Amino acid sequence: MRVGLLTREFPPDVYGGAGVHVEFLARELRPLVDLEVHCWGEASQRERGHGVVRHRPWSALDGANDALRTFSVDLAMVAALEGRELVHSHTWYANLAGHLAKTLYGVPHVLTAHSLEPLRPWKAEQLGGGYALSSWAERTAVESADAVIAVSAAMRQDILDCYPALDAARVHVVHNGIDTELYRPDPATDALRRVGLDPARPYVLFVGRITRQKGVPQLLRAVRDIDPAAQVVLCAGAPDTPEIDREFRELHEELSRVRDGVHWIPKMLPRPEVVQLLTHAAVFVCPSVYEPLGIVNLEAMACGTPVVASRVGGIPEVVVDGETGLLVDADADFEAGLTRALDRVLADPVAARRMGEAGRARAVGEFGWDAIARRTAALYADVLGQA
């Protein structure tokens, strides 16, 4: 089975959950299918021989709207996909490539929805008129795909709500996964010392992009009032727009004036250092206002850390309220609810340890990438059998 996997992000250029998903899915799919990954980046002849083909936006579009530059990458991908029996696209950045390959070569198109453009209106800040183009590309690809994979049951319902013309029988739930060998408790603390953390004080940890989707402004306001003994660690970078970047910096400065122990890490840390930070955090916080699943919660759980997260999207399918962490309603009381939940975990280290152990067990037992790859390959076979 010759499969083309289409994505924007692929190592070493991974900055979000979709990129993490594709990285590990590709690794586990390789023994099961003849896999060729098409992604963004500078082309490498060596990688082409190892099943990775990188494409960059056309130089004639340098400085143009990002949606147009994305479409140029999609066209380059399509031209390189001849001979593949099935294509599988991830995110709107590659969906159009999947749709055009289906149309040009007459092969099935499987699409994994990691998020939905109609549910992210703030993307208009980032893309301007390009948001209309990204929305068009996603709708066209979703409604025409032979199969659509939702990363959670909540995401499946969102897909059907946003795209009612889509046949529900073509939408399948295959959860995101976690490598519990890479993400596991690490007793080392050298990464903490490099960041400047006080090992004698507990800390609240956030890891994510600076975007409205991740609820970063709400978090910065919520942690003002948590236990003053706790440190706050923000592994936050890649702002979507200058506006959200400026808002983050202003809120960070305000927070740093009213409490000590605030640490902002704006760069992407190597995975081993992130694992250390996750391991030793008193609590991990995920304040997303929209989240189809949230791989980062699985990463924290796999490291044995309790999670405080918003009760949105697919997060309740990962974080079991009162067992592996606490869920907070993303309503008018959201910020105060985050404060209360974080203080509750910080105040009871014994219960926090118990939730962390339960989270690790759940990550290992329910979300292994090997099983997810097998389910994905089985879906490929079903789709090819129906073609």
Image (cartoon, rainbow, N blue to C red):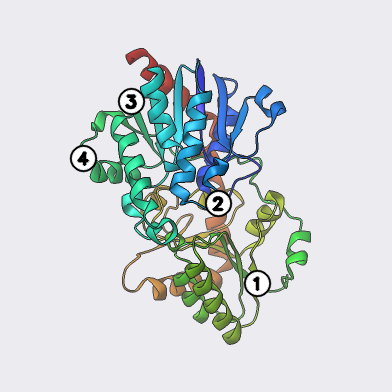
Q: Earlier in the sequence, mark 1 or mark 3?
A: 3
Rendering quarter of residue 148 = top left
> What percent of the width, then of the height, locates residue 170?
29, 29
Estimate how packed mark 3 is, as few (under 14), some (14 to 19) or many (20 or more) residues with alpha carbons within 10 Å: many
Residue 329 place in picture, x, y as percent = 35, 64
Circle 4 sits on which residue?
Answer: 164
Against 311, is 172 above or below?
above
Extreme left residue here? 165
Foreground residue among 371 and 265:
265
Q: Of label 3 and label 2, which has the lower sequence position?
A: 3
**Residue 176 can be seen, yes or no:** yes
User: Cα distance, mark 4 to mark 2?
Assistant: 35 Å
First in sequence, mark 1 or 4: give its number.
4
Dot 2, how many residues are within 10 Å of its Cα: few (below 14), some (14-19), or many (20+)?
Answer: many
Q: How many marks?
A: 4
Badge 2 amino acid: Met
> Mark 1 or mark 2, which is nearer to you?
1
Q: Left of 41 or right of it: where is 162?
A: left
- Distance, label 3 to label 2, CA atoms, is 34 Å
Amino acid at the residue labelled 1? His
Would you name the residue on which mark 2 appears?
301
Q: Which mark is residue 146?
A: 3
In the foreground, 14 or 288: 14
